[in-house]
Amino acid sequence: QVQLVESGGGSVQAGGSLRLSCAASGRTFSSYAMAWFRQAPGKEREFVAHSSAYYADSVKGRFTISRDNAKNTVYLQMNSLKPEDTAIYYCAADRYGSRLALAGRAYTYWGQGTQVTVSS
């Protein structure tokens, strides 16, 4: 069992930056593939970034995912934020650590989400 807790969300003006963190419980964190997803109001959940450094086109060049296995934490550095980045951001863990999965249904564990609001 893995528990994920996100933090770092907030409100920022367009062009600003935020860094999200996702702290994981469990001793096998390093074996999981990690990802970030987001869901905006009235829209479906969408893939943002994978721990293999694969990104959605909409965030490529602006967002950076990283992980610190010693701290059981994955990060999402978000720069040059745009109003369309406004969403609840979720981290997710895939127990099949060697695969690149873009669909949410592939992920076994999810955090509770953290709100990111970008104003113009």
Image: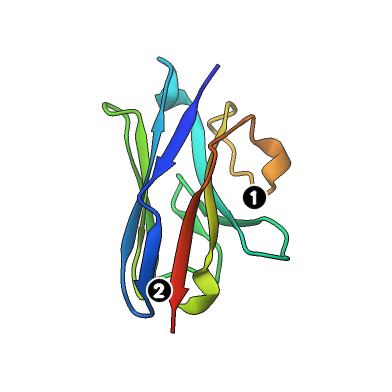
Residue at left 52%, top 68%? Answer: 86
Residue 79, numbered circle: none
- Tell me residue 39's x, y (percent): 63, 58
- Dividing the picture into quadrants, the one containing residue 96 is top right
Q: Residues within 10 Å of mark 1 (few under 14, many from 20)?
A: some
- Residue placed farthest to the left in the image? 70
Can you identify the residue that label 2 sits on? 81
N-term mark: 2 or 1: 2
- Tell me residue 28's x, y (percent): 44, 18
- Residue placed farthest to the bottom in the image? 120
The secondary element bearing badge 1 is classed as loop
- Tell me residue 44's x, y (percent): 72, 59
In the rendered image, the vertical position of residue 74 relative to residue 30, given as above or below: below
In the rendered image, the vertical position of residue 79 relative to residue 55, given as above or below: below
Quadrant placement of the C terminus: bottom left
Q: Nearer the viewer, residue 79 or 66?
A: 79
Q: Amino acid at mark 2?
A: Leu
In the rendered image, the vertical position of residue 18 relative to residue 61, given as above or below: above
Alpha carbon distance from label 2 to label 1: 22 Å
Number of numbered discs: 2
Quadrant placement of the N terminus: top right
Residue at left 34%, top 79%? Answer: 15
Q: Is residue 6 left or right of residue 47?
A: left
The secondary element bearing badge 2 is classed as loop
Residue 102, numbered circle: 1
Residue at left 28%, top 29%? Answer: 71
Residue at left 54%, top 47%? Answer: 90
